[in-house]
Image (cartoon, grey):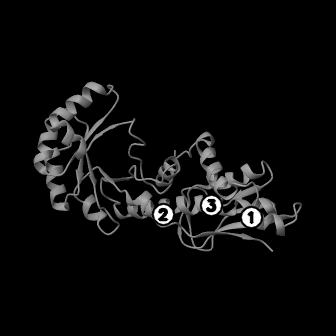
Amino acid sequence: MNAAPHRLVIEPLVRTALLEDLAHGTDLTTDSIVPGDRRATATIGARADGTIAGLDAALLAFELLAPGAVRAKVRVRDGDRAERGTIVAELDGPARTLLTGERTCLNLLCRLSGIATATHALVEAVAGTRAHVVDTRKTTPGLRALEKYAVRCGGGSNHRFGLDDAVLIKDNHLALAGSIREAVARARAHAGHMVKIEVEVDTLDQLREALAEPIDAVLLDNMTPEQLHEAVRLVDRRVLTEASGGIRPETIRAVAESGVDIISVGYLTHGAPALDLGLDIAL
């Protein structure tokens, strides 16, 4: 089940986003034009085809501005595909609240739906292979929980959430430790028995070194599809294989056909374009 992050996680993020617009406590344009007792209905609609994600966070903007005042009828759920012209949600409530919360709502919904849409495209591109598409820690500061949720809405999976839930020994760690053996030994001595250890390797020789140590996964960094085929053969299912580095929609199929288990793609959360959605007041 792809559960959305708990409100305890989402609410501080949405509050911060609202404060960017309301640092002085008022929507100067709306409050000067729209009477306080005016009610309105509105629709959130898709202006391009895509996968929806982030509705809870987006709609929370209105709830925080006016608790219980805006009624929302969601017609397309997170994880569902929406074609251009589809009504995603219908809103009814104080006109001021709808206008004041509009940009925060759309910023979150468009951003997260864009990530879900990009993820869906890559998942479709590797269909029929053993590869799982996962994200990275290249996320927007403060939005990691929501952006990783959006990846799941698009059919992808999550890599580690932070530095504290798994060991990933990268090139700079190896430079300071002196060798793969020493780095793994120190990590094993420090980490608990429940913590998995992954080592990043750039060459097949490094891969052979890593496979001699008690590790759980190898990150095959910036390797060609041919190198990845050979790496998968060398690993022979002893540990998980992860391909990473410069992977794009046009290259991911060749990477997946090498037989790797996981393909991690930073582009999903740092380069995916926002999905075009709009909020329109019904007249």
Which comes before the other along the chain, label 3 or label 1? 3
**Res 76 quadrant in image:** bottom right
Q: Which of 230 and 271 is in front in this view?
A: 271
**Res 248 quadrant in image:** bottom left
Residue 117, labelled with which disc? 2
> On the picture, is 241 further left or further right than 179?
right
Residue 174: image location, x then y, percent: 20, 41
Can residue 217 be seen at all in this image of the molecule?
A: yes
Disc 3 residue crowd, few under 14, some 14–19, many 20+, Cα 10 Å:
some
Q: Residue at x 51, y 46 (%)?
A: 145
Q: Nearer the viewer, residue 142 or 237?
A: 142
Q: What element carries label 1?
A: helix
Q: What residue type is labelled 2?
A: Thr
Alpha carbon separation for disc pair 3 and 1: 22 Å
Please identify, in this view, whether the residue under mark 2 or under mark 1 is nearer the observer. Answer: 1
Q: Which amino acid does label 1 sit on?
A: Leu
Q: Residue at x 67, y 59 (%)?
A: 21
Location of mark 1 (residue): 99
Q: Is mark 3 on a helix, strand or loop?
A: loop
Can residue 238 be seen at all in this image of the molecule?
A: no
